[in-house]
Structure formats: C-alpha cells, structure tokens
Image: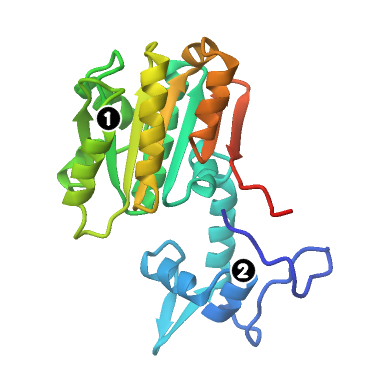
Amino acid sequence: MICRRSGGKHDGDGGMGRPTEAGKGLLEAAEVADYLGVGQVTIYRWCRERRLPCIKIGKNWRIRREALDDFLRQGEEQNRTLEGQLRSFLVVPDNVIGVAETPELLHRLDVAFFKVAEARGGLLVKFHGHEPASEDELRGEFERDGLEVSRLEREGRFRFSAEVHPADGRQDALRQILAQEADTGRTVWVTFDWMEHLDLGSALRNQEELTKFVGPRQLVVKTAVLQEVADNWPSETQRQAQKLHSGMIWLSDAGLSLSRVTPLPPE
C-alpha cells in the first residue's frame, strides 16, 4: 500500500500539496520520498526495479510529476484487488490461515498469494495432494488466472511439491527447501490447502509445530481451508486455529476480511 505522509503542506482543495522543483516537471528522490512517507532507499529501489519510472541526470535520480501521478493511481487500483489487499497484509516471516467459501475462491486466494510472492522476488511453492485437481490441472488453472507458472518454473522460481500425508511432515519438507535456498537469499512462499475433512487433533498439532518452525525464518506460509470444512469444527477448535496463526483471511462472495493477531499492550 502506498501511503502519503500525513504532515506537510496542503494545497487549496484540502489535499496534500504536490512536491515542486523550481517550476520544473522533475522531482528529486528526496522530495518524492518525503511526500510518500518512505525512505530514499525505497525510492532508489523502485527506480532500479522500474516500478517507478525515473531518469538519471548525472548521479541523481529524477522523477517526472506525471510518472508519480501514474504510480500513485496504479497503487490505488491495486489496493482494490485481492492481490493488492494481500500485498499490504502479508509480512515476512508470516504464518496465516485462510478460510474460503468455495473451491473457486480458495483457488483465487492461492493465485493472489503467489502474485504477491512473485512481485517480491520469492520462491513460490505449491504443496498439493489433498485436493481433487492434479498438478497439471493446477498449473492450467493458475495460468488461466494470470500466474505464469510455466515461465516461473523455467526460471526456478516456482515448484510443485506433492504431499502424501498433508497433516504430517511439513516441517521436514520446508526444512529441505530452505536448505536448498540458503545461498539465494530468497524468501520462500508456501501454500497448503485443506479441501477435505482431516483428523482435527493431528491437523492442529501439525499447525502448532509449523507455527514454531516459521519463527524468524525467511518464510511465508498460508494454510487455506474450505469454509464447509471449518464450519464443522467446534468453536474451541476454531479459536485454537486462529491462535496458532499470526493472521487470518476470510474470503467469500460477500467480501474479504483480514485480521492480524497483535500482543496485548503492557499494563
């Protein structure tokens, strides 16, 4: 999410005043950083990644006023999408649980999650085996929804991993992936889906161990479950599942709900 700094000068219509540079259409990186409320290093990174169109004059970056306006408009449009909402919600490391009303919405959640991961340069890992779709069918569905899985696989940035027993051994599989990625510096983004009824005791014990495993690692884990499965959980189990994750995503035809567990302030 792109946030403008709340302080500073305001223009005549009550909005934040645009940064200016002696009447020119070019802005300094420091001006743009102050206006957006981010560090100059972030502006430089956006320029290098070409997310924010810039030009270089000597050793200094300059941003055209029109390019800044387009950048802000695109950011506002992205924040209205599921991907945009998740982009603002997910952090590193993270361990979230999602509840989707339908298999189609659960699939959309997977795609949006992976698009955020791709934008952040991560390794994308789809664990499967406890859902009706095969690996080839999942690849086709992802491609149709705009996630270029085949390209990402060729680049070594996406992989499928089959789960024989989805409620067991996830930490071992993740430990192997992290060991393989140790020298790359990439964050690993992983999604597990529960689309069938599982033994709750075993599933929750596994999630508890998974939560401990995520810890400080460069790892973002999303476990998603169909709402009809979650509806059959006792209320105590639902509360326990929420406590085991740092954030929760509810996705239905009625809308999207994002919540984050935060520690109580000291007395």
* Crowd tier of the residue under label 2, counting other residues whose Cα lies within 10 Å: few below 14, some 14–19, many 20 or above: some
Residue at x-position 50% and y-position 16%: 230
Q: How is the image coloured?
A: rainbow
Measure the C-alpha gap from mark 2 to mark 1: 38 Å
* Residue 54 lies in quadrant: bottom left
Q: Residue at x 63, y 59 (%)?
A: 3
Q: Is residue 157 left or right of residue 221?
A: left
Q: Amino acid at mark 1?
A: Phe
Upstream in sequence: badge 2 or badge 1: 2
Name the kind of residue labelled 2 in the image: Gly
Residue 17 is tagged as: none
* Crowd around label 1: few <14 · some 14–19 · many ≥20 (10 Å): some
Residue 216, given in percent of the width and then of the height, sits at 39, 53
Give me the residue at 47% from left, 69% from top: 42
Residue in the foreground of this view, choosing between 244 and 139 = 244
Residue 220 shows in this picture: no
In this rendering, the answer to whether 126 lies above or below 11 is above
Picture quadrant of residue 158: top left
Q: Which mark is residue 127?
A: 1
Most foreground residue, 232 or 267: 267
Task: Specify whether 256 is left or right of 190.
Answer: right
Q: Which residue is mark 2?
A: 37
Q: Identify whether 158 is placed above or below 179.
A: above
Using residue 209 as the reference point, say whether residue 177 is left or right of it: left
